Amino acid sequence: LVRHKDYAQEKITGLVVTEGQETRTSDAVLPRGGIVSGVVYGPGGSPIAGAQVKLFPTTPSGRSHTVITESNGSFEVRSVREGGYKIHATRRRSSGDNPFMENLDLKDTQREINVRNGQTLGGQEFRLKDH
């Protein structure tokens, strides 16, 4: 894998590296990727800190991403490869919570999005429910 923090990663196949020898390959072109951002709100309508937002690819070229919301409930996922994704938010579990809370949050919040290179897909809001 070829990675850079400001770009989506790229996979190089068929490359053989031998210890002690210099290995050359063609240039790797890293796509800019997209940005997905938004806010997670709790059942009372207040932003939630520490919630998880996950992206799962629905196309073969994508990769999964997981981020944790900031103190104001906001999140940002950078360097997302172009393609389709399922995105959802789940709250942090505490002792005594419903053991199925994560599954219920996933069911309530999951949706599909499409990300394009260079695009900022903002305004992704998730409103968690009481269960």
Image: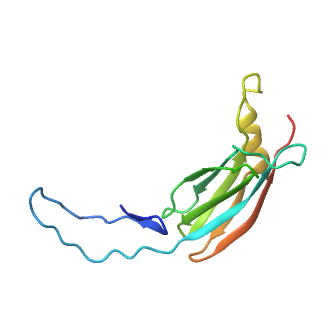
Q: Classify residue 64 by image quadrant.
A: bottom right
Rendered residue at 72%/23% (across/down)? 95
- Give the side of residue 84 with respect to residue 9, left or right: right
12 in relation to 31, above or below: above
How many marks the image carries: the answer is 0
- Give the side of residue 21 with respect to residue 123, left or right: left
**Of the pair 48 and 109, the residue shown nearer to us:** 48
21 in relation to 95, above or below: below
**Of the pair 104 and 28, the residue shown nearer to us:** 28
Residue 106 locus on image (x, y percent): 72, 44
- Give the side of residue 74 with respect to residue 10, left or right: right
Rendered residue at 50%/74% (across/down)? 32
In the displayed orientation, state which residue is furthest to the right: 44
Rendered residue at 73%/45% (across/down)? 49
76 in relation to 131, above or below: below
Residue 19 locus on image (x, y percent): 12, 55
Residue 4 locus on image (x, y percent): 42, 66
In the displayed orientation, state which residue is furthest to the front: 71
Report the quarter where the N terminus lies: bottom left
Residue 59 locus on image (x, y percent): 54, 63
**Of the pair 116 and 69, the residue shown nearer to us:** 69
Report the quarter where the C terminus lies: top right
In the displayed orientation, state which residue is furthest to the left: 20
- Give the side of residue 123 with respect to residue 35, left or right: right
Rendered residue at 89%/48% (across/down)? 45
